[in-house]
Image (cartoon, rainbow, N blue to C red):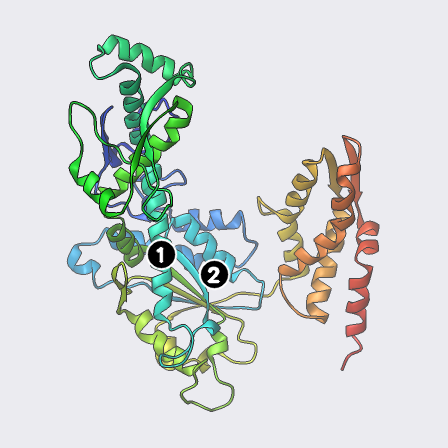
Amino acid sequence: MRRVRNPYNVQFNIKRLNFSSSSAAISPSSVQPEALDAEGTVLMAALKPNEVVSQLDKFIVGQPDAKRAVAIALRNRWRRHQLPDDLKMEVIPKNILMIGPTGCGKTEIARRIAKLSQAPFIKVEATKFTEVGFHGKDVDQIIRDLLDISINMTKKRLKESAKLAVAAAVEGKILDCLLGHNADEAQRNTYRTMLRDGALEDRIIEIDVPGKSEKGGPAASIDMGNSNQGVNLNEVLKFMKAGKKMERKKMAVEEARPILEEVETEKQLDEFDVNKEAIASVEESGIVFLDEIDKLVNSGEYRGADASSEGVQRDLLPLIEGTTISTKHGNVNTDFILFIASGAFHASKPSDLLAELQGRLPIKVNLKGLTEDDLYRILTEPVTNLIRQQVEMIKTEDVELIFTEDGIREIARVAFEMNKTVENIGARRLHAIIEKVVEEVSFQAPEQPPGHKIVIDKDTVTERIGDMVKVMDLRKYIL
């Protein structure tokens, strides 16, 4: 991948930027979120399914079937974009229904896949929505909220893409303030080097800064142009209509730089149709995760207009099948949004959903409940596992926290037994147990001498979670 020398240490892709030292603008060509890496750099190809699964394995233990399903769904999006236009419009996403107990990784899989693809993602509880005509949220709000998320993501992505262009423009403006517009290139280069080395941070320059609006609030700053180009009348009129005023102030370069950067960034965004880009991102890459969809199933044989169940299912049908939702930012088509629904289905079966809704969720994946070994692996295998989190947190106090092998095994054993005898909340049980185990350590750590070591072994775990074990034992005798 070709990159440009960047004195500001900002990663960017040359295809996305078109700038000079005095002015810069974001290229209006769209970038699909699937084609961006962690730094926002355009990639030539999306991740392959086995690469997606490998990434998910770093954070999620087990559930290979679910990982494969979402990996294929993500790859199919990339494949669709390679098709001819006439065929592309006919290929719709294969929506997924995840079936499994609480805390087995359903939500985490969807969240990680959205983060991997840099796609607009929203997780909603199906029980929060009601049928149209009843008091409460209607399902169309899902897409409106998703678009708001996409707009924020798009703005952030564009700002990241424009960092170098903004830095170049701000540098030029600061040099203009320091030297005027008639300085020769040799002098500008000398000052540019000094500026980048931080030698001019205390120099005083004069720039336009926000004054107060007619309502007394702060106003955004505006670039009034320079003496060679004249004042930008369109910008002046725009700010006058908004009731905003500008004030000429003297300040140090160090103070002026963030103000000028904000002005330049806003100018970049003004030249780019953020809403249009965000809508396109939602339509082509959006992911909606519908949790607790099993709660929309009526018990028994009753099939009627229930505001909290069957009615919501019927309202979801056109949304998942494909329709156009009106928002304040424009219309959004849902034809190619990927919907991932999930539910435990303890008191019902997936076949109890409306037949039409079942047909719109063709990929059904069963997630298994967590075993004691799974809980141990969750504690130790993921790159951000719970044990490492606790060790690193206590290390900030210059105290070394050590979990022994038998101590970790005991935590996993107790978590499994409590899930089996009290209530099965999956991996979430580990959080409660670990917090109980390290509660005293977290409280006393700041008082310990530097380099102090604290060992958590099986006996320590048993001592700290005695009350939890008693509750677990008593539940065995409840009929």
Depth check: give the residue in front, 80 or 153.
153
Q: Residues within 10 Å of mark 1 (few under 14, many from 20)?
A: some
Which image quadrant: the C terminus? bottom right
Give the residue at the far bottom of this rendering.
301
Q: CA distance from mark 2 to mark 1?
A: 28 Å
Amino acid type assigned to the residue bearing label 1 in the image: Asp
Q: Is residue 58 visible?
A: yes
Q: Is residue 288 left or right of residue 44?
A: right
* 351 lies above or below 155: below
Q: Residues within 10 Å of mark 2 (few under 14, many from 20)?
A: many
Amino acid type assigned to the residue bearing label 2 in the image: Ala
Residue 148, labelled with which disc?
A: 1
Q: Secondary structure at mark 1?
A: helix
Which image quadrant: the N terminus? top left
Q: Secondary structure at mark 2?
A: helix
Residue receiving disc 2: 66
What residue is shown at x 84% (from left), y 51% (from top)? 459
Q: Is residue 74 visible?
A: no
What residue is shown at x 27% (from left), y 69% (from top)? 322
What residue is shown at x 72% (from left), y 57% (from top)? 433
- Tell us which disc is closer to us: 2 or 1: 1
Sequence-earlier tag: 2 or 1: 2
Q: Quadrant of residue 393?
A: top right
